[in-house]
Image (tube, helix red, strand yellow):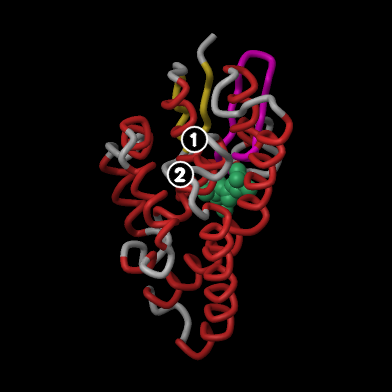
Amino acid sequence: MTLQLYYFPTLNAHKVTIALEEMGLAYDVVMINILKDEQFEPAFTAINPNNRIPALVDGEVTVFESGAILQYLARKTGLFYPKDEPTRARIDSWLFWQMAGLGPMSGQVNYFTRMGQKGQRKPEELEFALSRYTRETGRLFGVLERGLGARDYLAGDYSIADMCCWTWINSYPGNGGGLDAFPALAAWHARIAARPAVQKALQVGMIDPEIRALWLKKD
Ligand SMILES: N[C@@H](CCC(=O)N[C@@H](CS)C(=O)NCC(=O)O)C(=O)O
């Protein structure tokens, strides 16, 4: 049975399309339009009680949380998640770090930046939150820079740890000039961006003009 990916084109969901494309797995996309609150429909709540995409169904297996999905797919295929304990422990460290730190913190920067761009809050109301989350996100970029050091990838060869962190670097506001202070991170970002599977993964679900229009209007 083909894998069913419950999906909307966002940073967390792109981690999973990257893994699926890299692993060469066939999958059906079940579009859950979070701009129309489809994540709260009972059929999807039965799959993910947390009402967030992405989620994945593989026969009798249902898995939600992008990090857990990456681990599941990697265990299923035996790819991008070596079993030797030093490497696996390092991959898990970066996975949990992304899920608990980089994702939530830079997600807050994205949120408060958009609120400002839309004029929904006065600049002085946003200042405290934006400076707190921007500072913490900058610190986390520094952590990635140190973690990479002279390596090409976070844990030896390219792995699910890289897939998990990359989308958040790719879409961080100011990306481009924003990585000038982080040369190892910038090189790692470019190295992964050049992968055909990554380029294909970012296009999934972005062709529907209605969804794209809603995405661009998102607040
Ligand atoms: N920790 C979750 C976060 C999932 C998440 O926040 N998904 C967002 C899209 S990236 C969502 O479904 N938002 C819908 C909403 O906020 O109601 C994961 O990594 O899977």
Which of 9 and 202 lies nearest the eye of the viewer? Answer: 202
Q: CA distance from mark 1 to mark 2?
A: 8 Å
Secondary element at tag 1 = loop
Read off the residue under disc 2: 152
Q: Is residue 84 left or right of residue 5?
A: right
Instruction: Provide the residue span drawn in magenta.
Output: 52-67
Instruction: Give the amino acid type for the residue marked by disc 1 in the picture.
Output: Tyr
Label total for image: 2
Q: Is residue 114 above or below residue 156?
A: below
Q: Residues within 10 Å of mark 2 (few under 14, many from 20)?
A: some
Q: Residue 158: which numbered mark, if any?
A: 1
Front in this rendered view, residue 60 or 107:
107
View extreme (bottom): residue = 124
**Percent coordinates x, y for residue 179 in the rendering:** 39, 64
Residue reaching furthest to the front: 150
Which residue appears at 36% of the width and 34% of the height?
204
Residue 152: image x %, image y %? Answer: 45, 44
| In front: label 1 or label 2 | 2
- Give the quadrant of residue 185: bottom left
Q: Secondary structure at mark 2?
A: loop
Q: Is residue 50 magenta?
A: no
The residue at the point 43 percent across, 64 percent down is 182
**Residue 163 in the image, given as x and y percentages of width and height:** 50, 40
Q: Are marks 1 and 2 in contact (CB under 8 Å)?
A: yes
124 above or below 43?
below
